[in-house]
Image (cartoon, coloured by chain):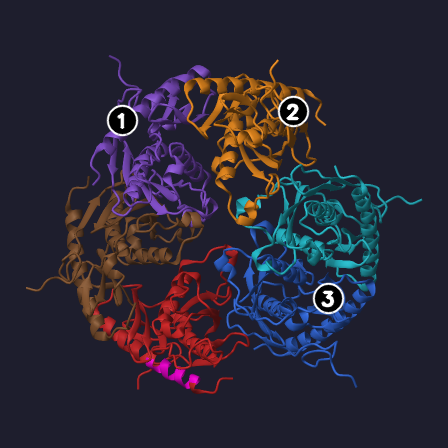
Chain colours: A red, B blue, C cyan, D brown, E purple, F orange
Amino acid sequence: MTESPRADGRALDELRPVTIERGWSAQAEGSALISFGQTKVLVTASFTNGVPRWLTGKGRGWVTAEYAMLPRATNDRSDRESVKGRIGGRTHEISRLIGRALRAVVDTKALGENTIVIDCDVLQADGGTRTASITGAYVALADAIEWGREKGFIAKKATPLRDSVAAISVGIIDGRPMLDLPYVEDSRADTDMNIVMTGTGKFIEVQGTAEGAPFDKAELDALLELGAKGCADLTAIQKAVLAEERS
Amino acid sequence: MTESPRADGRALDELRPVTIERGWSAQAEGSALISFGQTKVLVTASFTNGVPRWLTGKGRGWVTAEYAMLPRATNDRSDRESVKGRIGGRTHEISRLIGRALRAVVDTKALGENTIVIDCDVLQADGGTRTASITGAYVALADAIEWGREKGFIAKKATPLRDSVAAISVGIIDGRPMLDLPYVEDSRADTDMNIVMTGTGKFIEVQGTAEGAPFDKAELDALLELGAKGCADLTAIQKAVLAEERS
Amino acid sequence: MTESPRADGRALDELRPVTIERGWSAQAEGSALISFGQTKVLVTASFTNGVPRWLTGKGRGWVTAEYAMLPRATNDRSDRESVKGRIGGRTHEISRLIGRALRAVVDTKALGENTIVIDCDVLQADGGTRTASITGAYVALADAIEWGREKGFIAKKATPLRDSVAAISVGIIDGRPMLDLPYVEDSRADTDMNIVMTGTGKFIEVQGTAEGAPFDKAELDALLELGAKGCADLTAIQKAVLAEERS
Amino acid sequence: MTESPRADGRALDELRPVTIERGWSAQAEGSALISFGQTKVLVTASFTNGVPRWLTGKGRGWVTAEYAMLPRATNDRSDRESVKGRIGGRTHEISRLIGRALRAVVDTKALGENTIVIDCDVLQADGGTRTASITGAYVALADAIEWGREKGFIAKKATPLRDSVAAISVGIIDGRPMLDLPYVEDSRADTDMNIVMTGTGKFIEVQGTAEGAPFDKAELDALLELGAKGCADLTAIQKAVLAEERS
Amino acid sequence: MTESPRADGRALDELRPVTIERGWSAQAEGSALISFGQTKVLVTASFTNGVPRWLTGKGRGWVTAEYAMLPRATNDRSDRESVKGRIGGRTHEISRLIGRALRAVVDTKALGENTIVIDCDVLQADGGTRTASITGAYVALADAIEWGREKGFIAKKATPLRDSVAAISVGIIDGRPMLDLPYVEDSRADTDMNIVMTGTGKFIEVQGTAEGAPFDKAELDALLELGAKGCADLTAIQKAVLAEERS
Amino acid sequence: MTESPRADGRALDELRPVTIERGWSAQAEGSALISFGQTKVLVTASFTNGVPRWLTGKGRGWVTAEYAMLPRATNDRSDRESVKGRIGGRTHEISRLIGRALRAVVDTKALGENTIVIDCDVLQADGGTRTASITGAYVALADAIEWGREKGFIAKKATPLRDSVAAISVGIIDGRPMLDLPYVEDSRADTDMNIVMTGTGKFIEVQGTAEGAPFDKAELDALLELGAKGCADLTAIQKAVLAEERS
């Protein structure tokens, strides 16, 4: 039996330990503290009855997301974006990705004229912060929608969630495709890909980038297959967590 | 026996349940997740060998602090200061207070030319976020100094900490002085005071504000006494936490 | 007879020469050029009928304040905050203090739906700029309220001012408590305290900070007594100025 | 023979008319005015001897890119980002994409300690502005590198360009995959994908997003094939343009 | 016959070659790509029915302008103002000048409650960017007004343009007044003047600055005469361009 | 004898009462509180030995200026530029004008490697704030240069001031050219011109703008003549003030 080439001894297609503390926040309508190994993200979903002015009167709701990292979430401390007075490109990019990923499974008509703002704050970062954010955000979103239904802001029979959504990173290191990269692997990857999929196995977003050598179709296919496996595993975890009685 | 006039049934001079998870962060040189009841603050202490340029070559170190709140730490979501592009007055004021409080017990000569940046991020807010921040920051600071000593950046025999520091809020509600106010009490208080004291019982900072009616000397004295009691209790908790083996 | 230990020969409990030029501005509804020795602050009070949107329809008025320093008010020139594009923490903190101090003596119901904005611009700074600002602001505020009454925006019988307000700094230097510190003393003080009191001798705000060694209760009491004496002296000066015919 | 389902009568796998005016700018070391139909982007490449401080002394060069749109490049005028005082998320995201795409074909060791800044300014926008930017940027970059070689900043025998790079958009509209979408098609697409490839046919970046329904592997494969065809066509045009004598 | 003292051999009172590509933009209601020699400015005029809130209901229209330079329009690349997060003084000053110059020939009553925003983006800069901007802006403005008339937003018989407007730079170099300075001359000029005139030969704006030695009345008169000649030449070119059938 | 058509009864070519309090600031190296009627500007000149980095080692000094207005200098309160987080175009434009005007009379070689920063803060505004600023700034500049000479930063025999400088506004109201316009006249003027001249009667800056109808050469000449008269009067006042013993 061959040894794993990974620092933590995982199989190439194995997720890091995943935990989801649903309802972590006492105040938010939905929330989750999700961890992918050492990566920990606190997600809250804030429900407001009503929509932004540009959407008023169209009978549709709105879901948006903001991502941020605590200054010492990483190994070296970064300056706060509030102190710098401007949001960096990476932050913007990930916030937009999370928002798109969630909206892809939301039926905004069924949501009614309600707004849900998702906040993903990375408390500790060790690779995969955007995929953990999306995966945890789905749980918080589902609970916020349930809250809206209980309060009567969403119609009893409406099903604003068409599907579930999860996300995972994959990469090629030393020629080998691997699932769910921690920082130490991510920084060595030749190709880095983030895959966002529905619970029913369709693609919402595929973002692959050659960090080192460009990649060919065969490599791309291998990564997509691995990512599909990882998203399916995460979907199962989300289902189990949401099946529990809400605290 | 009379009933407590407080929502949570506490005695007038009783702290909320206080917990300190020392070493919560896997990356920071010192850290603590502190809670005063529902108020939860993640504090990290980042140690850097060297000082800002304006202090170079003077043989002294530097300790500074930044405070911030997650957007949904409170009951209603606030806009992120990074999104607004500017830091609010309240944030500035509390950051400055925390920094001053810590520097009051630090011998910067003994610290040597090293910098420690304290980050206090409020994950959940229910009154007393600034006092919890100071109290937790002392634990993170102590650990960061120990780290610096182990790495050889601080002299073996140096004692950069002259004393410990803790802080608590007190206030007058319906004519009765009370210790450690949660949000529901804080918002009703006529007078609101934050007291920062050393472990040996001296004052570092006293900030009292009449939110409703102005207060007289007798009321001020009652509040100071109550605050001294609370700070002494917190000092005991800090000592117990720091006496444990560091994980 | 012992000599004064102070640079300007004052008694320990003596104010610097205080002058208030009421009505300095030809345009503002209330104004005062106040000096505490070399410290000179131009205060204007701008009266507007109506309130900010968040207060509309509640039958209450609003008083707020902004503090700033000219770039060369100090011995070394500072960069303008407008040029830096952001307001510093100290500016924010003092603006908030002045606003709170004034609101503590204003009955906003009696003020009616009117807004008064106080601007305190330090033309020359030699310690005590925040206490001079508060003391001068009361005079400008009183005149702006009179103006509003004359114009019919405030009811004839309404008394929006419940009391007067004044402020002074005190500190401990070489073990001796002293009143109204100029820059040269302030920078040497072990403990520095700002005290804001009503004309009837109650406390509105007490802010004491250990700049050097922490302080004990006896020192705190000595400072509070000295501050009360200074505020009473300032109250007398305010009364005399406001008793004159308005130009 | 069936009619084209496209507004402009193109075949499904046909590019819009592409023109590249190489050397459009009299000042820049490399430049190109590229058009994909009505989309027009002015690209300049600015060559500087030396690198940013964080890269000094490592024997490697640096290539970076900035993307922006003139306010009236689009059908409705947008506010200038300089006037708003902040760069939007979309602008950041595209600037980063262009930079990554170019760096993927640059051997920074061979470039030596030189910096090339690529500016892509969209003069007129009709879909595909990021893909036109990358395609034009390669031409400007190649000329700037030639300039650096002629001036002696790059070694005569060095080959800083390992390959060429081009980019194109593809999408699924009414179930049919199509190449190079103008705005009118882009806004109707169910799935939208941007593909960046080397001249030798490998992938640098694949970014696919479900705007409407999520997509499956078969659809993804069809889009990738179409994109590869488009990039190959663009590579041929780049080659022809660069084969001409430089003006 | 004496030789010209100018680098490009022009007569002292001769314009550089001037071209105006009217209707360059496919989207804007009016547009022009104007060149004064190597200086190239893309001007668009955006027409909106309605006026800013502060002007609503007064029966008058509004014309305003924004000027900007591409980062590599000049010989050395400048940082983008959007990246710096603030607009420089020069940009502000020129935007304001262009707006004033255009409004001086517009009858805002005749324009009706419509807004026209002029954007002048310098694609290549070789001196005279502000004068080229004004001269080109007039052409774009005239076409946008025509568009508004055709769409019925402006009354058929209304004449919102009271006159035409053109602008040119003049300067004194080595004691000789010269017309239309390119960068190489502008940077050597002792006195530099920008003159904005109506088509009927009256002054709208005169801005003369001594860059080297102060100037006397005789020199000022010589410059004004030269400027009047240049503006008259530009007026003729504008007329010819506007006389053509609009594409 | 005809009556004056001016609100304050002045002759058409008569300045408002001008006062200059030289040395108003106890801290600045040069200062003046200048008033043109109700317009009051506090000018300070800050002297620093050394120059900005971009000028180091060239043997030349630097003079620059910043202009600002207190929020309630005008009849209606304006928001602070520090609060808005950006400096307006008007502020930038006037700051640049003041700096250019002063540099036109300074021999930077004779100044040596020293920097003088002029701050012009308008305490009360009633028209002519930029011209009062320039006129007062000359006095503050002269004193700061004297200070530098006394301290040995400027060579004893050097004459950094080649001439004096003063400025005045002129305008045409109801067809009549008038000198030194207060706000009430300025807002009615058809043409508005600011003239900056040396003490020896040469022009440094001429800025004329048609606010209403465009103007012709005869009107321009009348305004220039009037401005020259006003600048000569101001030059005489400056001379008298500087002839006094410096306090």
The quarter of the picture where residue C9 lies is top right
**Magenta region, mostly helix, strand or loop?**
helix
* Inter-mark Cα distance, 3 to 2: 54 Å
Mark 3 in CB contact with mark 2 (< 8 angstroms): no
Magenta range is A232-242
For image coordinates 63% across by 51% down, the residue present is: C91
Q: Which x, y percent locates residue C183?
A: 73, 45
Nearer to us in this view, F221 or C184: F221
Q: Residue at label 3?
A: B190
Q: Is residue A235 a member of the stretch shown in magenta? A: yes
Q: Residue at label 2?
A: F17
* Inter-mark Cα distance, 2 to 1: 48 Å
F164 up-or-down from C31: above or below? above
Which of the numbered marks, if any, corresponds to residue E236?
A: 1
Please, what secondary structure does the residue beneath circle 3 have?
A: loop
Q: Which x, y percent locates residue E77?
A: 36, 42
F131 up-or-down from B162: above or below? above
Mark 2 in CB contact with mark 1 (< 8 angstroms): no
Amino acid type at image mark 2: Pro
